[in-house]
Amino acid sequence: MTGCRRVVRGRGGRRHGAVRAYGPAHEAVALALNNAAVPHVNALTSADWRRLVGTSRLARVAVVDGRIVGVLLAFDAMADYDSENYLWFTARYPTFLYIDRVVVDPAARGHGLGRALYIDLEVAAREVGTPVLTCEVNERPPNPGSLAFHTALGFRSVGRQETNGGQKTVILMAKPL
């Protein structure tokens, strides 16, 4: 597969999909995936999405049968980004990669695509000497699937905070590399 960074194997070792670098042609589908995942991520306009992608250190998509079914955006510690959660990490870690959003189409879950996006991110982080991956998971409204996923990947809670004027509570998580 052209531009393929990582092949995803499904049950029985069959090739199921791939992780690729994000490109402008992916915008419409990636944005639709993002906005379908509200309230676990915030809804974005096309302009907001382009700004996030342009600011991100790493942007990847998961592709199955030529269809984008997942997206991941991550920011380094030097990004011009004002997310409350990102700023929490900048105040505590000098160097990190912050996973701002990861979304996998519900119909494509359970095949290792989210895990493959994270493995790709971890490899990229290690290649440039990044010592820690960071993220947050909603505690209120609850996102138990995401919490279980991140815990299984080795992320641990390093704090909590209320965001969106007290409408949300997040668990701030980190994974040393």
Image (spheres, rainbow, N blue to C red):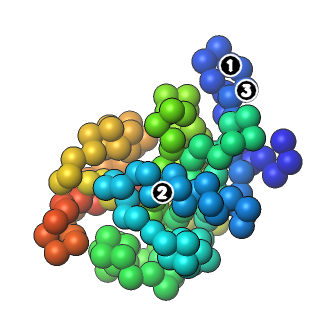
Q: Give residue 116's quadrant in the image.
A: top right
Identity of the residue furthest to the bottom in this view: 80
Q: Which mark is drawn over residue 57?
A: none
Q: Which residue is mark 3?
A: 15
Residue type, label 2? Asn
Could you say whether the residue bearing mark 1 is in a helix, strand or loop?
helix
Residue type, label 1? Gly
Residue type, label 3? Arg
Residue 114: horizontal and vertical position, in percent?
A: 52, 41
Determine the residue positioned at 54% across, 60% down: 31
| Mark 2 neighbour class, 10 Å CA radius: few under 14, some 14 to 19, many 20 or more | many
C-alpha gap between disc 3 and disc 2: 25 Å
Q: Which residue is mark 2?
A: 34
Determine the residue positioned at 51% across, 81% down: 79
Q: Which residue is mark 1?
A: 13
Q: Are marks 3 and 2 in contact (CB under 8 Å)?
A: no
Residue 130: horizontal and vertical position, in percent?
A: 54, 65
